[in-house]
Amino acid sequence: MRRYLLPLFAVLLGLVQPLHAQLQVSMEIKRHFLMVYEPIMATVTVKNLAGRDVTLADSATQSWFGFQINRADGQLVPPLDPNYRLSPLTVPAGQTIRRTLMLNTLFPIHELGLYRIRATIYYSAMDKYFQSALSNVELSEGKTIWQQTVGVPDGVEGAGGTRRLSLLSFRQADYTYLYVRVEDVDGGVVYAATSLGRVIAGLDPDAQVDQQNNLHVLQVGGAKTYVYSCIGLNGEVLARDTYFSAKVRPALRRDAAGRVTVYGGQLQAPDPAPGSGKAANKLSDRPVPLPKD
């Protein structure tokens, strides 16, 4: 999985400068209401309006690119690694740079509630900060509709441990979506909180675990349309296909050896390879810590 290596937030908030100064900073978060542990993707844009090339670099105490994140009560959310450093970057005069990252790989954003987020850029040559407009993100919990704890077999990363596999429905403004969550409860980490697409109210998905304890899910995605997904024990999407109901409605079938396949229906053109689309988004190869009791 792609790893996003970006620095953390600035702390001298009193030095933050207006948007119309030498650097123009903006941040886009496409979705502002998400399920807890779902990837929070932010795109930060920095435009150089200084009239000359600008080199952004860490100082002895400050990172040049980071975030200010507060909970609704004003409590500051600290970074997971306060000592992260990034190589200097030169932005030519009049040019723009963009960086997209997963915020919850850098910050412990895993509690329910509202978060207020700004991107901050530190320009060490002027000893000044520039910031984006404020953006709000609210985390809520889904409704658990299926759950099972399984062991991690030999030959798989984490062998000898356990994974809790959960299917949850999550209502958004337009539709209800089905999510899969993969957790190591004893180890205190979440490996993935992945959207599997829309679900139809009143039609629960079918879920089966195969001989390797991979999770297979078949859900109704629309009129005579079914979506099949296979999810590994570390949150990876191993397969994803679409079927439509022909003479025989598709269903999951587990044979005597423990293999799980889709029986019936007609396979449509293959979906994009796992990892290339929204359904394959995972938290990262650095799992998000579970909150402590």
Image: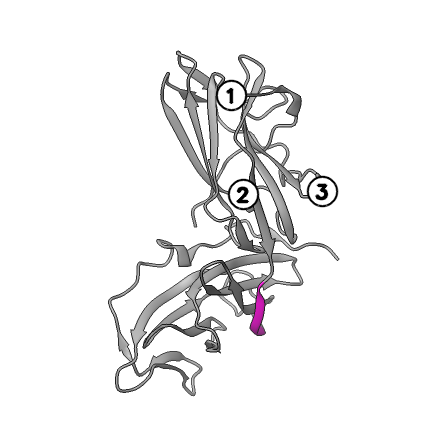
Q: Is residue 147 magenta?
A: yes
Q: Position of residue 184 (x, y in %)?
A: 61, 62
Image depth: mark 1 or mark 2 in front: 2
User: Observer-nearest residue: 189 or 222?
Assistant: 222
- Give the distance between the C-alpha atoms of the residues marked 1 and 2, in whole angstroms: 21 Å
Q: Are marks 1 and 2 in contact (CB under 8 Å)?
A: no
The extreme right residue here reads: 293
Residue 264 appears in the picture as rendered:
yes
**69 vs 286, nearest the viewer:** 69
Q: Considering only order in the chain, which callout, 2 or 3, is on the residue closer to the N terminus?
A: 3
**Three-letter amino acid code of the residue under disc 2:** Leu
Which mark, residue 57?
A: 1
Image point (30%, 86%), residue name: 248
Q: Amino acid at mark 1?
A: Ala
Circle 3: element type? loop
Element carrying mark 2:
helix
Structural distance between the alpha carbons of marks 3 and 1: 32 Å
Q: Position of residue 123 (x, y in %)?
A: 53, 18
- Which residue is at 46% across, 24% downward? 24
* Identity of the residue drawn at 59% across and 53% down: 139
* Range shown magenta: 142-148
Residue 189 figure quarter: bottom right
Residue ID for mark 2: 103
Q: On the rendered structure, is 143 left or right of 74?
A: left
Residue bearing mark 3: 73
Visual colour scheme: one colour
Q: What amino acid is at disc 3?
A: Asp
